[in-house]
Image (cartoon, rainbow, N blue to C red):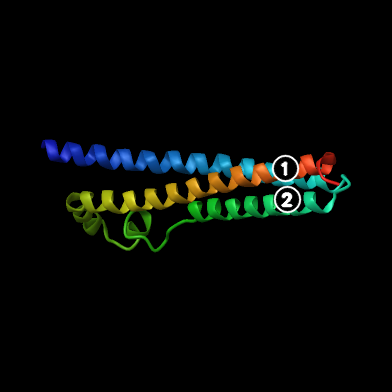
Amino acid sequence: MSTTDRDLIAAHAEVKAEIARTDTKTALLLAFVGAVLAGTWSLARDLPMNRPAIVAGGLGLALLVAAAGLLLRSTRPNLGGRHGFPLWATLTADEIAAAVAGDLAADIAGLSRLAVVKFTCLRRAVDLTMAGGALLILAALLAAGGAR
């Protein structure tokens, strides 16, 4: 095995590991956002709210719902992809062997693009979650008597 082959195999494993890490982070953040949404709904329906608290809380909830949408988009299966399972499902055993032998660099490029899309969605979702959380904290302060 040449140095180039080893480097390609290492790069392929690294990209797949990044995708797995991103998917794990996405799943954890999605669970967190869901818990915050459920907790906020449970708390807010029993509290007397003033108009500023309702506006801030509504915006915060909207940002959290948008974050959840981005997270779901990030985890959505890509069945139209040019690599991985969808490709293999359309090939014969001989075609798979030929594709794997000669197309590792193309697979690394495709997986890398997929990883960047997933990472970008995760990053935006984190930003929206932080902004939504800040607005929910503001809403809680306003409901507690900050603005009457």
Residue hosting label 1: 138
x 27%, y 51%: residue:
109
What residue type is disc 2 on? Ala
x 30%, y 54%: residue:
110
**CB of mark 2 within 8 Å of CB of mark 1?**
yes
Q: Can you give x and y, in whole percent of width and height, for residue 30 in the image? A: 59, 45
State the residue in front, 79 or 75: 75
Mark seen at residue 56 = 2
State the residue in front, 24 or 70: 70
Q: Can you give x and y, in whole percent of width and height, for residue 19 in the image? A: 40, 44
Name which of mark 2 and mark 1 comes first in the sequence: 2
Whole-Å distance between the Cαs marked 2 and 1?
Answer: 7 Å
State the residue in front, 81 or 120: 120
Q: Is residue 34 left or right of residue 93?
A: right
Q: Is residue 12 left or right of residue 60?
A: left
Q: Is residue 141 left or right of residue 34?
A: right
